[in-house]
Image (cartoon, rainbow, N blue to C red):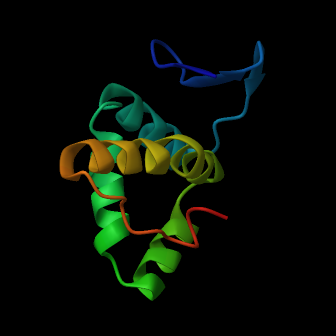
Amino acid sequence: MRLNVLGPIELVVAGQAVPAGPPKARALLALLAMHARRVPVIFGWLASSADADLLAASYADLPVVARLMFRLFWWPAYRRRFTRLYGATAPANALLES
């Protein structure tokens, strides 16, 4: 997967352009791409400390692409960093691990 942010924002998966969604979703993807190394830590910390109902509501508001990236990449990256830092497993979250 590749995200082109120079010129029009374009998401490329398996060599084919995928619609990146409305302007708000494209802006979010561009912001996340610019701060890619910080995203797992920030989102993981918020997800692990948020109330389950609040997390479910905020997760539902994310664009589909961001939810997919969060579940497949950012949450696992946060859990790995948490384990390296604290020597313990990050709390499990059914919403993010399903």
Return the x and y of residue 45 as percentages of the image width and height: 28, 60
Quarter of the figure with residue 48: bottom left
Which residue is at 27% across, 42% downward? 84
Answer left or right for 2 relative to 87: right
User: Residue at 44% across / 39% down in the picture?
Assistant: 27
Q: Residue furthest left?
A: 85
Q: Position of residue 5 (x, y in %)?
A: 46, 19
Residue at image point 29% right, 50% down? 82
Number of numbered markers: 0
Q: Which of the image's four quarters has the N terminus?
A: top right
Residue 95 sits above or below residue 38 on the image: below
| Image quarter of the C terminus | bottom right
**Is 72 left or right of 33, judged from the image as shown?**
right
Between 95 and 26, the one nearer to me in the picture: 95
- The answer to whether 73 is drawn above or below residue 87 in the figure is above
Pick whichever, 82 or 60, lies toward us: 82
| Relative vertical location of residue 61 with respect to residue 64 in this rendering, above or below | below
Residue 14: percent from the left, percent from the top? Answer: 77, 18
The front one of 69 and 86 is 86
What's the residue at 64%, 43% (across, down)? Answer: 21
Tell me the quarter of the picture where residue 52 sits.
Answer: bottom left
The x and y percentages for residue 68 are 62, 48
User: Relative to 43, is 29 on the left or the right?
Assistant: right
Determine the residue located farthest toward the front in the rendered image.
87
